[in-house]
Image: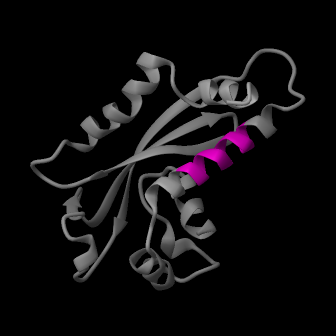
Amino acid sequence: MQVVLSCFLEALGISRFHASTAKSPGAISRFLNHQNWSLRTLIRTIRQHALRTFQDSLRGRRGRPPLIEIIVDTTSISKEGAFAELDGWIHTLNSVRGLHVVMLYVCCGDLRLPWGFKIWRGKGSPSPTDLALRLVRPRVSTGEGIATSTKAQEAGA
């Protein structure tokens, strides 16, 4: 799982499974295809880790509060062959056939933390740009986000 997350943490728009020295691209693909994923649990775990990492980076810091940036990135995970379990999720975007994930990252200094994602479901569904706006809008309009969550966690919520 660490190998998969590290590929997403680069936020370069492409998966770097082939560049991994820890696992082969085939092993990573099989892991993604055959796991029974609980997305709620996965998202909750990633966000808890992100908040702990963010808080650890701020501990002992003095002076001006750090600048927090939001990055939205479309990451394409190339898939070849037929995958019945991924029916409806495998499409072609920018000449890449595979699974296309619009990722929302919260960045602070050298930290780049995955915060949310949407899966692009092909033509006839909202575009990757529309999905990116859906990821960003609630955080901007309501103030929800990593800073608000950090304050809530410090208050014991």
The residue range painted magenta reads 44-54
Q: Position of residue 98 (x, y in %)?
A: 28, 67
Residue located at (58% from left, 69% from top): 1
Query: Left or right: where does residue 48 sit relative to residue 36?
Result: right
Residue located at (71% from left, 23% from top): 66
Residue located at (36% from left, 54% from top): 101
Quadrant the C terminus occupies:
top right
Question: Where 49 falls versus 108 (above or below)?
Answer: below
Q: Position of residue 38 (x, y in %)?
A: 46, 62
Looking at the rendered structure, the number of numbered marks drawn on it comes to: 0
Q: Position of residue 95 (x, y in %)?
A: 22, 62
Question: Where 152 falls versus 28 (above or below)?
Answer: above
**Colouring used for the render:** one colour
Is 31 within the magenta? no
Q: Residue 14 or 35: which is nearer the viewer? A: 35
Query: Left or right: where does residue 80 sit relative to residue 63?
Result: left
